[in-house]
Amino acid sequence: MPQNILETSRLLIKPLTHAQLIKYLRNDHSLEKELQLNRTARTISTELKEALEETILPNVADESKNYLFSTLWTVILKAENKMAGDICIVGEPNDKGEIEIGYGTYDEFQRKGFMTEAVGAIIKWAGNQNNVRAILADTQKSNIASYRILLKNNFRKTGETEELYKWRLDFDRV
């Protein structure tokens, strides 16, 4: 698998392989050791644990799929050499060229602009993929920080449910 590491001024954003996802799920610092990173305090939500076990790991293991559209991309702070959060693309582009992203910042790194920067890097990467025409995202209405990340990255609100706002960023394609 190619090493598609994205870089910004403060961050490295690295897609995790199947073996690395298993270490991520163990949450025993074996992933940090393999990546030669300093330890980070992180918790794995029930939702993320289920997504890893039921969707992400099987999709990354499926060699007929491009794992970059299914894996977790870990967000690494260059200055501290620590994992600070994760971004996931929820599967390969659909027939309209749409992908969906989800993301989270570990508690100690919130409110510092790291995820805004990381989402910007994923947008730039996705914009260079010929089969991607738009990025979708959902945020909890109560999670103001999460939807501010999308607003800062030029997403527009396209709808809502009782609990969620729905967002979209279109790429201008000829």
Image (cartoon, rainbow, N blue to C red):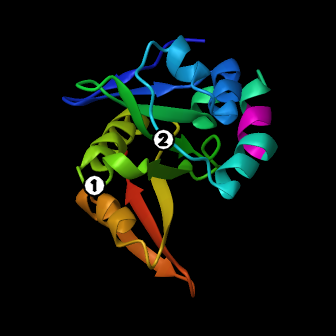
The residue lying at 22 percent from left, 31 percent from top is: 10
Residue range in magenta is: 55-59
Nearest to the observer: residue 135 or residue 117: 117
Residue occupying the point 28% across, 26% down: 80
Q: Residue at x 78, y 41 (%)?
A: 53
Q: Is residue 168 left or right of residue 16?
A: left
Q: Which residue is mark 1?
A: 153
The residue beneath circle 2 is: 86
Q: Secondary structure at mark 1?
A: loop
Q: Of label 1 and label 2, which has the lower sequence position?
A: 2
- Does the rendering let one see residue 8? yes
Q: Amino acid at mark 1?
A: Asn
Q: Which mark is residue 109?
A: none
* Element type where label 2 sits in the image: strand
Asked if residue 4 is positioned above or below residue 26 in the image, the reply reads above
Q: Residue furthest bottom?
A: 162
- Calculate the distance from the C-alpha at mark 1 to the C-alpha at mark 2: 17 Å
56 left or right of 108 in image: right
Of the pair 80 and 159, the residue shown nearer to us:
80
Task: Reply yes or no: does residue 135 show up in magenta.
Answer: no
Choose top left, top right, bottom left or bottom right for residue 45: bottom right
Q: Nearer the viewer, mark 1 or mark 2?
A: 2
Q: Is residue 57 magenta?
A: yes
Residue 162 drawn at (x, y percent): 57, 88
